[in-house]
Amino acid sequence: MKPQLSQLDKLISSFDRGLRTIFAEPQGTNRKNPAKNIEDNSLSDADKQLSIRLMRVNHAGEVAAQALYQGQALTAHDSRVRDSMHQSAIEENDHLLWCEKRIQALGGRTSVLNPVWYTGSFAMGALAGFVGDKWSLGFVAETEKQVIAHLETHLQTLPIEDQKSRAILEQMKQDEAHHATIALEAGGVPLPMPVQIAMQATAKIMTTTAYWI
């Protein structure tokens, strides 16, 4: 039987995960990087910059996803929902690591505003979890749905020669769909349309900003 953590213990654990997400190497599943065995084609300077910017946006999105999961896990009412959030967060850490390594390989950098994305998303996740598990799970499903649409756009925009980045995004897309399904099967409910629209607007601000900085 797992020991029960106090609220202070949970806060400390969340803070530690946040620091690892932004400044260090978070815990992943040790899955093989989808880009590992793919030939690194030569990219023009323009194509390389485009790939860097797109992958920086995806990395920032994964930072935000981590924060959402950690915030929701902190305030989840059901321990099974909390455990599911933590497991999904660990799997999403693979995406975070893959994106960062790809950005580094291309000679780029991650967003300098990652602490901002994390803080804001953590607050949103904690609020969603506090409102209720069915809404929190619905929030996960809607987030993943929007992320999938975003990834599909990036897959169409990436330079054709950048097969490494493409392989990473394809795997991420599969994982996001899986996490959405898990959230719905666990009892998630559709969010009101105004909430969906607000989420889209917030995501637009983040992705547009992260593209450049």
Image (tube, rainbow, N blue to C red):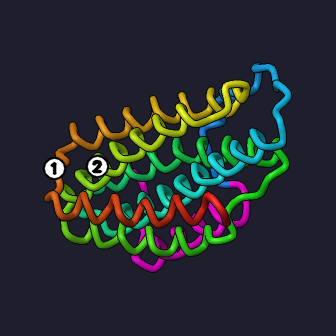
Q: How dense is the environment of label 2, judged by Cα within 10 Å: few (below 14), some, or many (20 and up)?
A: many
Q: Which mark is residue 142?
A: 2
| Residue at image location 57% in from the left, 36% down from the top | 157
Residue 40: x %, y % from top left: 82, 26
- Queried whether the magenta region covers residue 3, the answer comes back as yes
Whether residue 80 is visible: no
Q: Which mark is residue 172?
A: none
- Queried whether the magenta region covers residue 178, the answer comes back as no
In this figure, which residue is indicated by the disc labeled 1?
190
What type is the residue that disc 1 sits on? Pro
Q: Earlier in the sequence, mark 1 or mark 2?
A: 2
- Spatial CA distance of label 1 from label 2 is 7 Å
Q: Secondary structure at mark 2?
A: helix
How many numbered tags mark residues here? 2
Residue 168: x %, y % from top left: 62, 32
Left or right: 130 in relation to 148 = left
**Residue 37, image quadrant:** top right
Residue 129: x %, y % from top left: 28, 65
What type is the residue that disc 2 sits on? Glu
Whether residue 59 is visible: yes
Q: How dense is the environment of label 1, judged by Cα within 10 Å: few (below 14), some, or many (20 and up)?
A: some
Residue 78: x %, y % from top left: 24, 57
| Residue at image location 83% in from the left, 42% down from the top | 45
Left or right: 122 in relation to 35 = left
Work out whether residue 9 or residue 117 is closer to the camera in this orientation and state it: 117
Q: Are marks 1 and 2 in contact (CB under 8 Å)?
A: yes
Q: Main secondary structure of the magenta part?
A: helix
Left or right: 72 in relation to 97 = left
Work out whether residue 172 or residue 159 is closer to the camera in this orientation and state it: 159
| Residue at image location 30% in from the left, 72% down from the top | 127
Quadrant where the image shows the C terminus: bottom right
Q: Which residues lie in the magenta part? A: 1-25
